[in-house]
Image (tube, grey):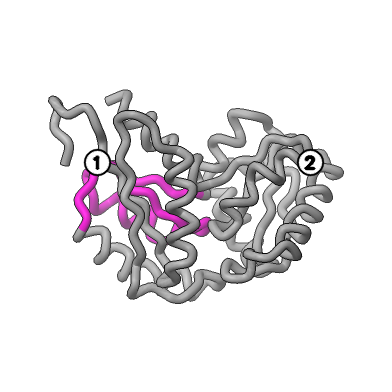
Amino acid sequence: MTNATDTSFKVVMINPNSTDYITRQLSQAASETLGSGLEVEVITSHGGPPAISSDQDVVDAVDPMLRTLRQHPADAYVVGCFSDPGLAQARQEFDAPVFGIAESSIRVAQSISPSIGIVAGMEGAISRHTVYWGKLGALDDIVGEIACGRGVLDLESEDAYQDVLAAGARLQEGGAEVLVLGCAGMTKMADRLSADLGLPVVEPCRAALQRAADALSSD
């Protein structure tokens, strides 16, 4: 852990599923967020489900994720899945601050506009997300959430991007003034989507890492 005389902080970002492709996407987001005084280690929870798509996947991801995090001491942690699995449990267990990418992205989006649109992956995730937005007190700021119809492991192609773009355009037509990408697999789409739609787009991994950096630098 970093002591008071150190000039840098270590953040561990974990992919709660066991698919290394998603970990590489998180690493890309981390590389775009790095600044002086912040070291980010991106790791995989190899005991987690291959993808976190269902409510049961969220439950199944928690214990292996926590076991993995215990092996990686850090000044802060980031849970790199948009369902924020195990976030409450991790905050209870670790003394270091823990950030979820969904919670972080909503907070960052709220700082931009009270009219937030969310591009989800699969339709089944929306009801789970809606319950979470209620817990965060954010429902009044969300004008809509639309699924692009792609799972976390099916977001690599140009066709997938076009599906995300179409969902984002519908949200924009519905009054969204800022978009949140509701899946870690959409990480590399953020800048292109923002340019194509002319809207700010919050990429959740970057949002969480920035919040972690801000919290650590303010201590």
Q: Relative to residue 22, is residue 199 drawn left or right? A: right
Q: CA distance from mark 1 to mark 2?
A: 37 Å
Q: Is residue 38 above or below residue 170?
A: above
Q: Are marks 1 and 2 in contact (CB under 8 Å)?
A: no
Amino acid at circle 1: Asp
How many numbered marks, from 0 up?
Answer: 2
Check if residue 157 falls in the magenta segment.
no
Percent across and percent down for residue 127 are 64, 62
| Viewer-proximal residue among 67 and 213 | 213
Would you identify the image quadrant in which residue 176 lies?
top right
Judge by depth and name the residue closer to the eye, 24 or 216: 24
- Secondary structure of the residue carrying tag 2 is helix
Q: Which residue is mark 2?
A: 197
Please tell me which of labels 1 and 2 falls first in the chain: 1
Q: Which residue is mark 1?
A: 75
Say whether residue 4 is left or right of residue 209.
Answer: left
Say if 58 sits above or below 38 in the image. below
Q: Position of residue 38 (x, y in %)?
A: 32, 35
Q: Quadrant of the C terminus?
A: top left
Residue 100 is left or right of residue 77, and the answer is right
Name the amino acid type tagged 2.
Leu
Is residue 86 within the magenta segment?
Answer: yes
* Closer-to-camera residue (58/154): 154
Give the x, y percent position of residue 5.
Answer: 13, 25
Residue 26 drawn at (x, y percent): 46, 54
Q: Which residues are magenta?
A: 72-101
Q: Quadrant of residue 128?
A: bottom right
Classify 91 as above or below 62: above
Q: Residue at x 68, y 32 (%)?
A: 114
Give me the disc on residue 122. Answer: none
